[in-house]
Amino acid sequence: MTIKLEQHIDPTLVPILEEISDPEIPVLSIMDMGVVRSAILEDNIAKITITPTYSGCPAMDVIGEDITKAFAKENIEAKVSLVLSPAWTTDWITSRGRKALEAYGIAAPLDEEADKEALLGGKKIVKCPQCGSVNTKMISQFGSTACKALFQCNDCLEPFDYFKCLK
Amino acid sequence: MKNENKIQYIYGIADNALILGQRLSELCGHGPNLETDIALTNMALDLLGQTRSYYQYVAELSGEGKTEDDIAFLRTERQYKNVLLVEQPNKHFGYVITRQFLFDIFHLLLLEKLQNSEDERLAAIAKKGIKEVSYHQRFSSDWIKRLGDGTKESHQKVQEAVDDLWTFTDELFHSTEEDQIALDHKIGVDTIELKEKYYQKVKEILEEATLSIPETKWFQKGGKQGIHSEHMGYLLSDLQYMQRTYPNMKW
């Protein structure tokens, strides 16, 4: 899926936006998360539009405040607004973001079909971010946050989060 | 469509999410095990998130400087338009799952239609919600099967819950005056159209769960008109306590 986000994002604002991370997953910048929908600078006011991952995601309020603070440091006033449509999908996580997730110990989302097989069919395809084995099992469909499910590796025995595919 | 009619129409959808979200929140820390505890509160969070999206829209439509908090916390019982099903208490885990299951099947059918609403804002909220609610439906359907086709005791408990809660299902398809106006303006959903599909889907899963389908022809109603069961007052006193005691307090 190709999304032409670039045209709405002012490249001069990107370094500031990349400094802001998801408070639940500190290794992932909001750019890599794919939640920044547009960023425009007009009369020294940065107009940033973000989209929630899940409707009730409490991180959104914090992200909004973090954006305002980060721009204030650069003496730029930021206005943050929330858009719901088109709804966020895990496809918008960048490949750099997926790597950061894995390095942090969270298995990155599989594609839609594989995700269903893993979550509903019990198929062993989610790779353990610790040891790389696919000999893993789902412990809970719901995990520590709305976007994750809980898994465990049968080989190294470590439990880990799996970022659910959302389409 | 007049704003006031649209607001009332949105309450009919949003209040279900708020009240069921509140019921599920009550279980935080009280689930039968860690996984289900987390699942139920995850679902509560999704529902409260959807509620916020609806109420923020209502706040904009009503003007008068209203906020989403005023709408959630400062209405009187009669002003809430949720169906009776969602306010029913958390008697036991099987009861919670049955209530969830009977609502989820309806909720997904509703949102799948609402995403085609000519009101762009409602369509966007529905599209977002579909992704979350399909996951809820998978969870509750899965548990219905596990409990129904589980032990003798789990079967009996969940069968009793189905028999009890069945009387609240017909109300899901009642059409209010606002529903009709919204439908005429191509904003709302024709819930009557969902009825056949709903019972077909519900029966399919109940059969797989080895549960029998109640034969009752008598159904409860009233929530959509603001006439609630005795449980609603207790629920609201819990929900509204902080805002009533410390007006305008914030986190």
Image: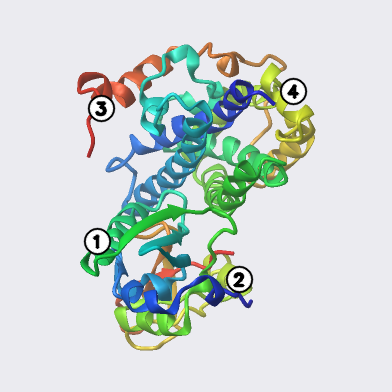
Whole-percent x and y of residue A105?
Answer: 32, 78
- Inspect the image, locate mark 1, and give the three-letter code of the amino acid beneath it: Lys
- On the image, numbered disc 4 is attached to which residue? B180
- In front here: B28 or A133? B28
Whole-percent x and y of residue A128?
Answer: 39, 81
- On the image, numbered disc 3 is attached to which residue? B248
Mark 4 or 2: in front is 4
Whole-percent x and y of residue B103?
Answer: 58, 36
- On the image, numbered disc 2 is attached to which residue? A112
- On the image, numbered disc 1 is attached to which residue? A69
Q: Are marks 2 and 1 on the same chain?
A: yes
Q: Are marks 3 and 4 in contact (CB under 8 Å)?
A: no
Mark 2 or 3: in front is 3
What secondary structure is found at the residue carrying circle 4? helix
Q: Whole-Å distance between the Cαs marked 2 and 3?
A: 43 Å
**Left or right: where B90 falls relative to A83:** left
Judge the density around disc 1: few (<14), some (14-19), many (≥20) Cα neighbours within 10 Å. Answer: some
- Inspect the image, locate mark 4, and give the three-letter code of the amino acid beneath it: Gln
Name the residue: 67% across, 26% down. Answer: B214
Name the residue: 23% across, 35% down. Answer: B250
Q: Chain of mark 3?
A: B
Q: Is residue B4 visible?
A: yes
Judge the density around disc 4: few (<14), some (14-19), many (≥20) Cα neighbours within 10 Å. Answer: some
